[in-house]
Amino acid sequence: MKALLIIPTYNELNNIQKLLPAVLDRYPGLDILIVDDNSPDGTADYIRKFMEDSTRVKLIQREKKLGLGTAYVRGFRYVIDHGYDLALQMDADFSHDPNDIARLLEAAKEYDLIIGSRYIQGVNVINWPMQRLLLSFFANKYTSIITGLPINDSTGGFKCFRAEVLKAIDLTKIRSNGYTFQIEMNFKAWKKGFRLKEVPIVFTDRVEGTSKMSKKIVYEAMFMVWYLRFRSILGILR
């Protein structure tokens, strides 16, 4: 199947210089799309130069920092418009192990949405402060209780979608833009009857760069799970 890996970036030059070769060398059939939010560190300039020697790397450079969710939506539209069968997503900072891409692709032979899960086999997170770890773990428990979503890691960003899932979801109606974006996409895929599968991974906190976590993102998540539940009950979820 024709697959595209979507990687949003903002000031990820040092990481992307290492990640591109690591992915391209291991997965010769995989293309990569970088969605860059006009990084001041020159990430997009580096990608453009890299593209001179590799037709497998694509770039969308946006005019300013617009957020994680909208970056992925832009990438999903690219997947649909260019006839890809699979859309993978991962962070640029090596918190997701490129070696695990193979496991997502293998699971995609049978399932429609595959989630690299930090919590399906205990807690597999390295280098997070305890406060951050507890916030993430209980946020996922909270999400499952409120929405009924039958997965352990609703907020993880290491995933693989079949293109059919993206076509079935009205991407113009996606409301969330932080990590809550992951919850919204998972919930809508589940409610539309697609097959979800969690694959255990080990998540390692970023070595370079800074975290995108903020109080605004936490508040967005608390609101969004109730929004999704009530929209589903009323039968107006798209």
Image (cartoon, grey):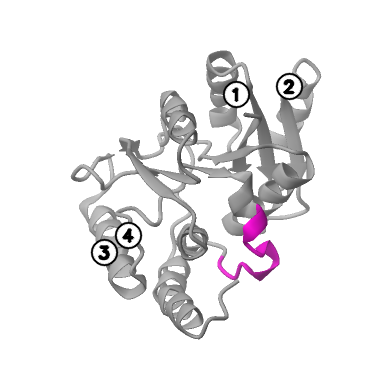
Whether residue 175 appears in magenta in the rendering, the answer is yes
Q: Is residue 94 left or right of residue 36?
A: left
Question: Within 10 angstroms of label 3, few (less than 14), some, or many (20 or more) residues?
Answer: some
Depth check: 209 or 175 in front? 175
CA separation in Å, label 2 and label 1: 9 Å
Measure the C-alpha gap from mark 3 to mark 2. Answer: 41 Å
Residue 20 drawn at (x, y percent): 60, 24
**Is residue 159 something one can see in this rendering?**
yes
Q: Residue at x 32, y 36 (%)?
A: 201
Q: Give, as a three-letter code, the residue at label 3.
A: Lys
Residue depicted at x 53% and y 36%: 92
Disc nearer the start of the sequence (4/2): 2
Cα–Cα gap, marks 4 and 1: 33 Å
Q: Quadrant of the C terminus?
A: bottom right
Q: Residue at x 21, y 42 (%)?
A: 121
* Position of 3 relative to 157 (above/below): above
Q: Secondary structure at mark 3?
A: helix
Percent of width and height locating residue 198 = 35, 44
Q: Amino acid at mark 2?
A: Phe
Q: Marks 2 and 1: CB-CB under 8 Å?
A: yes
User: Circles 4 and 2: CB distance less than 8 Å?
Assistant: no
Q: Tell me the number on the disc at residue 141.
A: 3
Numbered disc 4: secondary structure: loop
| Label 2: few (<14), some (14–19) or many (≥20) C-alpha neighbours in 10 Å | some
* Circle 1 SS class: helix
C-alpha gap between disc 1 and disc 3? 34 Å
Q: Give the residue number, with chain letter if any, for mark 4.
A: 150
Rounded to the nearest angstrom, the CA distance separating label 4 from label 2 is 41 Å
Residue 70 seen in render = no
In the image, which residues are magenta?
A: 167-176
